[in-house]
C-alpha cells in the first residue's frame, strides 16, 4: 500500500464528502479511492469513515486521524518545497493573528513585503485584542505583546516591549507630575478594562530598604477606562489622563513633544513581543520563514526609530 497516496485520498474524501468527488478531483475511478481507504483502515485496524449510499461521515478515530494526516501532508509539501529553489521556496496559506493596535502598525505593513518575497504563499491576517485559541480557530501563528501565560504553545521572542507612563504637558501642568509610582493613585489614569498583558497592573521597579530593587504592580484608577488601546492613546493625547503605553505606540508623540514620559527612573524591565504557535515536530516552511522574517525586520536598528 502506498501510504502517502492513501493519506491523500482519505483527506480528500473527508473534505469533499464523497468518493466520487475525490476521485473526480484526482482523475481516477471511485473504486480506486475505495480500495485505498479499505487498505488504510485494514492497515490501521480501525474504522475511519462510515460510508452509506447518501453520505460519508468520520468516526471518532477518523476525526483525530484527519488532523494528523493534514499536518503530515502539509509537512511533506513544505519539505519538497524547501528542497526546490535552494531551500527558499515556500507555498500554501498562512493564517496569522495579532493585537489590533500592534498589528496595524507593525504586522500589517510587513505582510506585503513577505508576500513579495514568497509569491506562492497567501496570508490571512486577523487583528483582534482577544486572545485567540490557535488550534481551535485554525491559526498558524499569533503575534503577542507582553507577559505570556503558561501554556502548551511554543513562543519565540522577537523584540523587547518597553512600557512608559505618558501624559500631555498640559495635563501635567494642571494636575502635577508624579514623582513616585504611588503618586499615580491620586491622579487620573487611563486604564485598559481587559487586557491579558496588564492583568497584574502597571509594573514598576522600585528600591527596597536593603538598596536592592524589586518589581511592584499597581492598579491606578481613573474616571475612564476602555478595552481598546487606540482609544486610550487618543484619550491620552486629548489630555484626559496618564496612560501606561508601549514605546512603539508613543515614541513619535514623545519625540514631537505631544506627550511627556514620567516616572522613567521606575520603569520596569521590558517584557517581550513574541511569535506564538502550536507545538509541532516540524514547522511548515512558510511559518518558519514568516517568523524569521519578523525577527529580522524587528532587529533592524532603524526599525523602531530613535529610542526614547
Image (cartoon, rainbow, N blue to C red):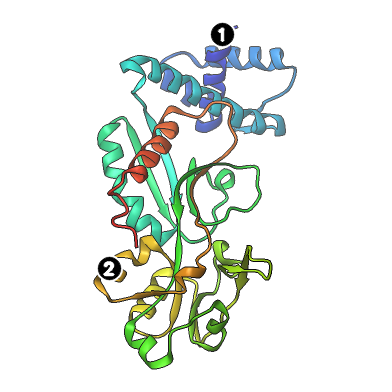
Question: Which residue is the extreme one toward the top?
Answer: 1
Residue 200 showing in the rendered view = no
Q: Secondary structure at mark 2?
A: helix
Residue 266 vs residue 193, the one in the foreground: 266
- Mark with earlier residue (2, 1): 1
Residue 144 located left or right of residue 215: left
Q: x, y percentage for residue 139?
A: 50, 44
Q: x, y percentage for residue 225?
A: 50, 79
At x 59%, y 46%, the residue is 136
Q: Secondary structure at mark 1?
A: loop
Above or below 184: residue 287: above
Q: x, y percentage for residue 110?
A: 30, 46
At x 36%, y 37%, the residue is 293
Residue 124 located left or right of residue 130: left
Q: x, y percentage for residue 226?
A: 48, 76
**Which residue position is annotated with label 2?**
255
Image quarter hosting the C terminus: bottom left
Above or below 295: residue 149: below
- Please rate how many residues cluster around mark 2, counting C-alpha atoms within 10 Å: few if below 14, some from 14 to 19, many from 20: few
Image quarter hosting the N terminus: top right
**Which residue position is annotated with label 1?**
2
- Please rate how many residues cluster around mark 1, counting C-alpha atoms within 10 Å: few if below 14, some from 14 to 19, many from 20: few
Residue 184 vs residue 143, the one in the foreground: 184
At x 68%, y 17%, the residue is 41
Q: Nearer the viewer, mark 2 or mark 1?
A: 2
Question: Which residue is the extreme one toward the bottom?
Answer: 174
Residue 36 showing in the rendered view = yes
Residue 251 vs residue 183, the one in the foreground: 183
At x 48%, y 86%, the residue is 188
Q: Quadrant of residue 67?
A: top right
| CA distance separating discs 2 and 1 | 64 Å
Question: Which residue is the extreme one toward the front?
Answer: 211
Amino acid at each position: 500500500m502506498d501510504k502517502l497516496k492513501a493519506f491523500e485520498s482519505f483527506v480528500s474524501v473527508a473534505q469533499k464528502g464523497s468518493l466520487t468527488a475525490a476521485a473526480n478531483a484526482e482523475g481516477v475511478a471511485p473504486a480506486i479511492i475505495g480500495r485505498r481507504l479499505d487498505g488504510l483502515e485494514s492497515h490501521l485496524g480501525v474504522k475511519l469513515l462510515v460510508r452509506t449510499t447518501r453520505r460519508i461521515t468520520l468516526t471518532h478515530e477518523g476525526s483525530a486521524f484527519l488532523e494528523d494526516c493534514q499536518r503530515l501532508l502539509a509537512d511533506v509539501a513544505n519539505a519538497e518545497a524547501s528542497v526546490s529553489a535552494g531551500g527558499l521556496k515556500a507555498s500554501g496559506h498562512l493564517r496569522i493573528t495579532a493585537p489590533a493596535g500592534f498589528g496595524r502598525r507593525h504586522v500589517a505593513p510587513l505582510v506585503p513585503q513577505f508576500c513579495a518575497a514568497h509569491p506562492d504563499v497567501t496570508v490571512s491576517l486577523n487583528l483582534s485584542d482577544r486572545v485567540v485559541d490557535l488550534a481551535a480557530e485554525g491559526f498558524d501563528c499569533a503575534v503577542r505583546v507582553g507577559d505570556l501565560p503558561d501554556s502548551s504553545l511554543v513562543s519565540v521572542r522577537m523584540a523587547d516591549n518597553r512600557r512608559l507612563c505618558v501624559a500631555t504637558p498640559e495635563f501635567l501642568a494642571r494636575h502635577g507630575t508624579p514623582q513616585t509610582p504611588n503618586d499615580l493613585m491620586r491622579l487620573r489614569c487611563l486604564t485598559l478594562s481587559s487586557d491579558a498583558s496588564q492583568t497584574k497592573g502597571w509594573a514598576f521597579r522600585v528600591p527596597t530598604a536593603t538598596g536592592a530593587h524589586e518589581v511592584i504592580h499597581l492598579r491606578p484608577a481613573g474616571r475612564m477606562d476602555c478595552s481598546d488601546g487606540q482609544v486610550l492613546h487618543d484619550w491620552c493625547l486629548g489630555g484626559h489622563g496618564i496612560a501606561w503605553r508601549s514605546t512603539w505606540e508613543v515614541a513619535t508623540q514623545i519625540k514631537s513633544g505631544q506627550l511627556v514620559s514620567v516616572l522613567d527612573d521606575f520603569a520596569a524591565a521590558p517584557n517581550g513581543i513574541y511569535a506564538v504557535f502550536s507545538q509541532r515536530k516540524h514547522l511548515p516552511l512558510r511559518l518558519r520563514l514568516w517568523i524569521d522574517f519578523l525577527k529580522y525586520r524587528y532587529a533592524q536598528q532603524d526599525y523602531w526609530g530613535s529610542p526614547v
